[in-house]
Image (spheres, rainbow, N blue to C red):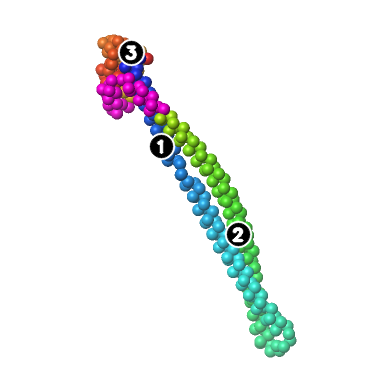
Amino acid sequence: MNVSQQLHQLQEIDLEIEANERTLRQITGQIGEDEVIVRAQQKLASERQQLEELQRQQHTAEWEIEDLTDRIRPAEEKLYSGRITNTKELTSLQQEVEGFKAHRGQLEDKVLEIMEQVEQAQAKVATTGEELKKLEAEWQNQQQQLSADMERVKALLADLRQKRQVLTDKIEPQTVTLYQQLRKQKTTAVAKVQQGICSGCRISLSTANLQQVRSGSLAHCTNCGRILYLA
Ligand SMILES: [Zn+2]
């Protein structure tokens, strides 16, 4: 393997290392990321709060109904006892009882309405609770998968870096430095020659340049400066 072939191989390894480093960064960003869970928990908490508020309203209305019933009973007893003979007093008491009953009727309607809302709120809480459970299970699985992926990518990177070391040990240090400078400048430092054209800049090589490449010595494209490599 001549030096340009070695450098090409080095570039292949470096590209693979970079791709795996990107993957590793993505995985690291996703590990522990639980925004979906937190949102579902917040949703459940707010739905539970709404449910409790409705139940509180229901109980308050029920107590008021009880209270009214407690007031209606003695008033009616008094009304029908025959003890009151004064017409004005009777009418007033009757109006009072009617007023209580009307109010109680309204409250009973309100309780029915609230009970319906309570039922809906309970259904919501149950659904969100189920969703949350499902999300948590999915999240656990995903996290396990991510951890496994991370281990795999880390092992792959260690292997690639080892391969890179073995390869660079075989190349002159100043050539490696030159390659690295070109990589920084142009991303691809080593360009394949295809049908007399530099694949880095897509320009046809001069005959002299082409001969240089064919000789197997380190040759640069006279146009873009990349190291030329003949497959
Ligand atoms: Zn070129």
Amino acid residing under circle 3: Gly
Instruction: Tell me the residue that label 2 is attached to.
Output: 117
Percent coordinates x, y for residue 160 in the rendering: 40, 27
Closer to the chain start, of discs 2 and 1, is 1
Q: CA distance from mark 2 to mark 3?
A: 79 Å
Work out which quarter of the rendered image holds the C terminus and state it: top left
Closer to the chain start, of discs 2 and 3, is 2
User: Is 162 displayed left or right of 65 in the figure?
Assistant: left
Residue lying at 55% horizontally and 57% vertically, measured from the top left:
48
Q: Which mark is residue 196?
A: 3
User: Is 11 displayed left or right of 53 in the figure?
Assistant: left
Instruction: Tell me the residue that label 1 is attached to.
Output: 25
Displayed quadrant of residue 193: top left
Secondary structure mostly seen in magenta is helix
Q: Secondary structure at mark 1?
A: helix
Vertical order, 2 against 92 (above or below): above
